[in-house]
Image (tube, rainbow, N blue to C red):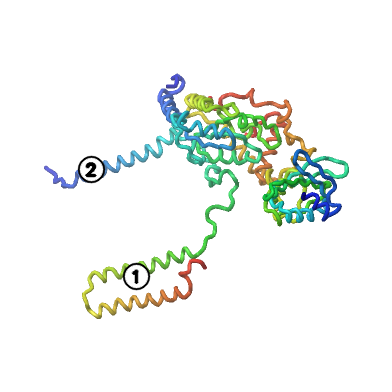
Amino acid sequence: MAAINLDDSVMTTRLDSVVNWARKNSLWPLPFGTACCAIEFMSMMASRYDFSRFGAEALRFSPRQSDMLLVLGTVTNKQAPVLRQIYAQMAEPKWVVAVGVCASSGGMYRTYATLQGIDRVVPVDVYVPGCPPRPETMIYGVMELQKQISRESLSARKEHIERFYQSMARQEELQRAKGLTSYQVVREMVLEAGAAGGQKIW
Amino acid sequence: MTPAFSPFLPVLLLFLIALGVGAAILVVSGKILPGLLKPDNPQAAKLTPYECGAPPLQQGARHRYSVKFYLVAMLFILFDVEAAFLLPWAVQYKTHLGTFWAMLSFLATLLVGYIYVWGKGALDWER
Amino acid sequence: MVIERIEAQLPGAILERHAFRGDETIIVAGTRFLEVVDLIFGEGYQLLLDVTAVDLEAPDYRFEVVYHWLNLASQARLRIKVPVAEGASQPSLVSRFKSADWAEREVFDLFGIPFEGHPNLTRLLMWEDFPGHPLRKDFPLDGGDLFCSQDIGASFAPEARSLNA
């Protein structure tokens, strides 16, 4: 149970821990599998490592029916607006786990085609390194996410999600203004952010 | 003074309690609990149709479709109602020529319509 | 051997030939290319395996478009290279070989070599309004993203903290 903070009312804290307990033990993943990490994810779901022990039996390939976006594999610059759209369509509460080095930082692909880490375009909660990470590593990553969820508070606003939706609005505005495709707009936003010193566009 | 209680007063009481409990359930599960628990962040992007993240191929699901679906539905209703009229007539029919010819004239009227529809090709699916 | 037959029937078409451990390669001038293709099609080389290109930055021509054929009957392979100058286009083989369709689109996308007669010459791997042609030698590997290839710029690491804290 969460520690009782004397500044909050006791009722809120207890509700927080019940709600967080329910949320962290029923994380339904959206496997955004693009490359080899998705194969390791498949073996994680299979009987030996059995990810469904963590309440994640229900693999929903729809953003409306899942709460954890598992990005498994390399995300190219062409795929970046697709990933943003899927994250935007997910209903809250939602979390993102970047599985593998390609999703975390671009991995071994330091090129024009590969997005150098999905944290440039979507907010990420847990990074799981590995190429690919073993199923136990991925399970450890999700357990870290569970620890983070149990520390959450119902009343706190999720600033990163708000910033993300603001960046989606900026992206749409730029698309309309410049008449470019979403791919080129996101690429330009990433390059601009990189030139300015930071990397995130959200 | 003993007022005369209606024997149905308990029923009214039960009805009111049922209404109250129902309303309480609705209010708690519809307003109070969501008010506490829901992450209130309505965004336009969450309402867009899911097309695997790609921009939508056509504007919404209201794209054009063939009128043959409407025709089939309409013709079905007509002839189904005709059959519905036939059934009670058939139940109380006792051999009487007048009743027979009355129904036959009704069917003949609809037969003319059927021949017209057939001739016009509205029954051809592949048009 | 098919190369001898090409030399006999189309003299002057082959500019150069070489072989390496069983791989036969001929360099054909762009103007004679379609005749050579029709000839080898008749000889049984009917499966076009791949169309690709090399950016040589050579003095007289810049690119070399490389075609690979397989003769299914004799299991013999043939490589034909066609020198293409900067800005020049190649005739498309889509009418003869369906496999040329996307292969030529890929070459157009990554090198910028147009193919005349292609039914749908649009970018395949990169997005429609991508600026530039990535596999040309003057295109930077990181595509203009300095953080990608060099150790400059801020990384996200100093800010890394739990978003849910």
One can see residue A20 in this view = yes
Q: Secondary structure at mark 2?
A: helix
Quarter of the image where one finds residue B77: bottom left
Residues packed near mark 2 inside 10 Å, few (<14), some (14 to 19) or many (20 plus) = few
Task: Determine the residue positioned at 38% across, 68% down.
Answer: B78
Q: Secondary structure at mark 1?
A: helix
Horizontal placement of A100 versus C151: left or right? left
In the foreground, A131 or B14: A131
- The residues tagged by marks 1 and 2 sit, at their Cα atoms, a distance apart of 47 Å
Q: Chain of mark 2?
A: B
Task: Determine the residue positioned at 25% across, 80% down.
Answer: B98
Amino acid residing under circle 1 = Glu
Q: Locate the N terminus of chain B by quadrant.
A: top left
In the foreground, C111 or B122: C111
In the foreground, A81 or A136: A136
Q: Residue C82's mark?
A: none
Horizontal placement of B76 versus A38: left or right? left
Q: Chain of mark 1?
A: B
Provide residue A188's location: percent of width, then percent of height: 70, 38
Q: Please tell me how many numbered marks the rendered image carries.
A: 2
Task: Determine the residue positioned at 57% across, 53% down.
Answer: B59
> With respect to residue A173, does A98 lie above or below?
above
Quarter of the image where one finds residue C94: bottom right
Q: Which residue is mark 1?
A: B82
Provide residue C9's location: percent of width, then percent of height: 82, 56
Amino acid residing under circle 2 = Leu
Provide residue B81's location: percent of width, then percent of height: 35, 67
Earlier along the polypeptide chain: callout 1 or callout 2?
Answer: 2
The single residue placed furthest to the left in the displayed view is: B1
Q: Residue B13's mark?
A: 2
> With respect to residue A128, does B65 lie above or below?
below
